[in-house]
Amino acid sequence: MAAAIEAENLVKTFGDVRALDGVSLDVPEGTVLGLLGPNGAGKTTTVRVLTTLLQPDSGRATVAGVDVLKHPNKVRSLIGLSGQYAAVDEYLTGRENLQMVGELYQMSARDAKKRALELLEWFNLAEAADRTAKTYSGGMRRRLDLAAALVVRPPVMFLDEPTTGLDPRNRLALWEVIETLVEQGTTLLLTTQYLEEADRLAHDIAVVDHGKVIARGTADELKREIGGERIEVVVRAADLVPEAVAALTPYAKGDPTVEKNTRRITVPVSGGARVLADAIRELDARSIEIDDIGLRRPTLDDVFLSLTGHVTEGGAGEDEEGGPVAAGKGRRGQGKDA
Amino acid sequence: MTLSDTRGAIGGAPVTPRRGVAATAHDSWVVAKRNLRRMTRIPEIVVFGLMQPVMFVLLFSYVMGGAIAIPGAPPSHQTYIEYLMAGIFAQTVTFAVAGASAGIAEDMTKGLVDRFRSLPMSRAAVLTGRTLADLVQTAFILVVLALVALLVGWRIHNGVLDMLAAFGLLLLLGYAFSWIGALIGLSVRSPEAATSAGLIWLFPLTFVSNAFVPVSSMPGWLQPVAYWNPFSATVQACRSLFGNQLGPVPDAWPMQHAALVSVVWSLVIMALFSWLAVRKYRRAAG
């Protein structure tokens, strides 16, 4: 399959800061690449270079086979860009915004009008079509912004943190729209801080940190790479902990960890559900009462943490609220001293 | 699947490419339309754009008019308002700078400039569209201001054609200055900074001129500066065209050839700043 987006060794410095330190990536046609990374990692800069907004100091990039540096205007007619903040004119109505974008994509005024109407209907904005965007809710503005990126049905789309700041319902709705686009064959480069979003939408994930791609693969591949299947058991009473640890040790692929106050034992394993079944039988045979047991696979959060040494902003905010229970150095609620 | 198949499957882009001047004209018109729509939806901007010069007319003519002596006439409200109006008109058109700079800075911070720059449109159109819309607004303000001035005693003495010529010079100057505003708007980080950066240098420019007091009343070393000020040439040309020149035209060369100097200044400013601004727009990194 041909690559719809290809970047080789992109370097961009702002003063002393090396925003891009040799970013290379390729997105096969019709697939979604999730660009995952903390703020300032270089995600947005990468998108800005690929969408012709920013000249790299060095490197090469093509979009839909067209050289971004040599033929930027050709590239612009093949892409749609939807940014972090909804780039719509708040003093124009939804209809006027889309019509303007259509005309600037060089459509005839009549086609632009027709297309605006189609998009407004598709994005559930028909009723608000003649209200200024100022009166729109955050979710509506974001939909309008995405609609503006879709005016010419571009084969390649760039979405820079499309759902940042949206409530879960609106996020879900936007995900469904994005999935429809991909089903229809659009190639998509998506930046996000939400691991869940990358997990759900992206075929492939590139983890970016300090201006470099530090890992690349499907969500499953990345999770496998950092390994770490484990069984988590919560026993009924604190005095059962030592015996439970003894029961589980034969299955462990590493040292079990114990959280005393929650009576939780975590044991790294390999072998999946079969090991879990064996472990349950063993605990049962020793009559150790348990409140909870489960097999835990690493989440993209774990991948991110292990690759970059810090949690994502999205995750951190939510988790840190989580609890006074959060033990010791761990920034997260549950014990995950992997 | 090839790329063209992909595009077919989802409809394909009905793009008819325009090139060169036609593209710039079309895209500028689309952007100008957008900015004019905005103006009708934020009428406060036009209202405040009007209030400032109206206030100046009233304050200058009623408060200071009696004290400022115009060569060739005794100090009075009537003679001073005739002298004053060319200066107020010229100051009003140059203050359009602030509109352009704030508007473009706002488009930058809101991400609209990114949206425009990602579209296959002319690289000059966002700025040209803005300056053209400002020109329309300036013309509207001039008309209203002229009516107010007529109410408080301003009169023209050389007929309508000369008056239209004067307004032409004023609009040309205003248009040239809005390109300075465009450059400022692209260069500063926030719309608030753009407003002050757009205005602050206009005060010395408009006051070290013949707009409000005769240059002959200034210290000797300042007089050449005031006479060669692009602003003074336009003011002098308009004053003569309105028939508001009470005494003889000052002897300085730029005053004797005011209309010519005014046009040349405006064209030079427009050429220089439109070139700088479009260059900046191409490279603009948010």
Image (tube, coloured by chain):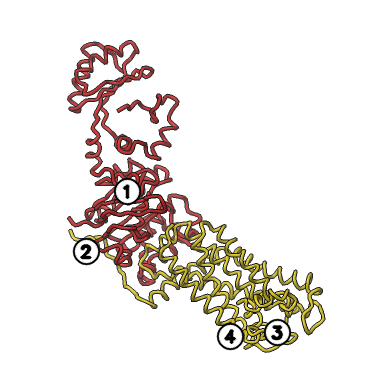
Query: Of helix, strand and loop, which one carries label 1?
Result: helix
In percent of width and height, residue B123 lies at: 40, 69
Q: Which mark is residue B23?
A: none
In the rendered structure, the residue with mark 1 lies on which chain? A
Establish whether labels 2 and 4 are both on one chain: yes
For chain A, give the colour: red
Q: CA distance from mark 2 to mark 1?
A: 25 Å
Would you place residue A213 above or below residue A275 in this image? below
Quarter of the figure with the N terminus of chain A: bottom left
Residue that badge 3 annotates: B250
Query: Of helix, strand and loop, which one carries label 2?
Result: helix
Q: CA distance from mark 2 to mark 3?
A: 70 Å
Q: Are marks 2 and 1 in contact (CB under 8 Å)?
A: no
Q: Is residue A66 visible?
A: yes
Give amino acid for label 3: Pro
Give amino acid for label 1: Glu
Q: Image quadrant of residue A113?
A: bottom left
Tell me the yellow chain. B
Residue that badge 2 annotates: B4
In the rendered structure, the residue with mark 3 lies on which chain? B
Report the residue at 30% width, 69% height from top.
B14
Would you place residue A80 above or below residue B123 in this image? above
The answer to which of marks 2 and 4 sits earlier in the sequence is: 2
Give amino acid for label 4: Leu
In the rendered structure, the residue with mark 4 lies on which chain? B
Label 4 crowding class (10 Å Cα cut-off): few <14, some 14-19, many 20+? some
Q: Which mark is residue A176?
A: 1
Residue that badge 4 annotates: B260
